[in-house]
Amino acid sequence: MSADIISGYGEGGTETVLSVDAVAREAEALGSGITSEEALSLCAGEPLLELKGLKAGYGKMEILHGLDLAVGKGQSLCLVGPNGAGKSTVLHSIFGFTRIMGGSIHMAGRDVTALSPAEKLAKAGIAYILQDNSVFPDMSVEENLLMGGYLKSRPAEARAAAEEIFGKYERLAKRRRERAGVLSGGERRLLEISRALVMDPQVLLVDEPSIGLEPRFIDMVFEILEDLQKNEGKTIIMVEQNAKKGLGFADLGYVLVSGRAALAGKGGELLENPEVGRLFLGG
Ligand SMILES: Nc1ncnc2c1ncn2[C@@H]1O[C@H](COP(=O)(O)OP(=O)(O)OP(=O)(O)O)[C@@H](O)[C@H]1O
């Protein structure tokens, strides 16, 4: 058996899948790359957030090699691609966690490339929702939520924003005095999203919303994100290993391969692309 082929036993019997390296090699051939004009043409109207030829990485290591990406106000975008392609690094770079080595990031036409994470949140309206379980388990739900407002100049503003969020999400409000550590996985994810909402951001960067969740909670989290996008006009950029779910949800999909956008399109169109299906959606 080739090292590129892995066999295992799925629900329907023996399954044959490609190894991670083989997926990465084959994905390189998916497309010749997305230009800034193509990225802009996918965007609804003026871009709210635009990456132009972005090069970024960690230390001396460049991970993103000139990425063009654009998303409009109230649009959602999902990044898919093989492991190690740099999907999370895109979110890290937008939020200011990486070293920018070239290109730019514009938010509502303003150059925000050099802003720190705190400035991205407080001044540019960009919030990052961590991939990992990031609630403080020994603090109450309410205290966790108030942490989201630590950059507000007056504590009363954070409290008012938290009350508004409790008004919207009854399941959090009912448990506001309880330790966050006793919440279910889905409730914890709701708390993480809510904490980001305290600063009323325009853009939500969401890293792996479905990771570690039971299926019923995955649906709940996607419904919450859909409500924020459709009813509150939030722009959502997500990384999602569950490519079917992510591309099914998002208006736009980008296939990232080795730090470049190999292919981009409407989320639904990418789902129907047979090559994307074979490489990322299990056939
Ligand atoms: N903090 C960091 N310091 C140094 N290198 C990092 C750091 N974070 C990620 N990398 C490296 O950057 C590359 C891209 O990683 P990234 O997590 O962005 O990929 P990904 O596409 O999100 O992968 P996965 O689907 O496996 O989560 C990898 O080689 C990874 O080892």
Image (cartoon, rainbow, N blue to C red):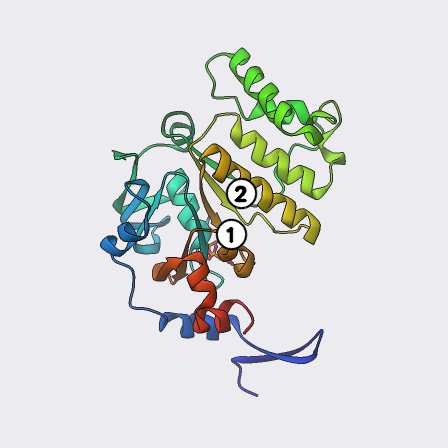
Q: Which circle marks residue 249 in the picture? A: 1
Give above or below for 54 relative to 20: above
Query: Residue 62, image x and y in percent?
Result: 34, 54
Q: CA distance from mark 1 to mark 2?
A: 8 Å
Give above or below for 45 relative to 112: below
Amino acid type, callout 2: Glu
Locate residue 48 relative to residue 168 in the image: left or right. Answer: left
User: For the residue carrying disc 1, how many other residues have a C-alpha within 10 Å: few (<14), some (14-19), or many (20+)?
Assistant: some
Query: Residue 88, image x and y in percent?
Result: 46, 50
Query: Residue 32, image x and y in percent?
Result: 29, 68
Q: Which residue is painted at 67% across and 38% down in the image?
A: 188
The residue to which callout 2 is attached is 226
Which badge, 1 or 2, is on the more N-terminal residue? 2
Locate residue 212 relative to residue 271 in the image: left or right. Answer: right
* Cβ of mark 1 under 8 A from ligand 1: no
Could one spot residue 171 in this view of the protein?
yes
Q: Residue furthest left?
A: 37
User: For the residue carrying disc 2, how many other residues have a C-alpha within 10 Å: few (<14), some (14-19), or many (20+)?
Assistant: some
Locate residue 96 relative to residue 35 in the image: left or right. Answer: right
Give above or below for 200 relative to 271: above
Query: Residue 162, image x and y in percent?
Result: 59, 21
Position of the N terminus by quadrant: bottom right
Q: Which residue is painted at 38% across and 28% down in the image?
A: 119
Secondary structure at badge 1 equals: helix
Q: Quadrant of residue 166?
A: top right
Secondary structure at badge 2 equals: helix
Position of the C terminus by quadrant: bottom right
* Labelled pair 1, 2 in contact (Cβ < 8 Å): yes
Amino acid type, callout 1: Phe
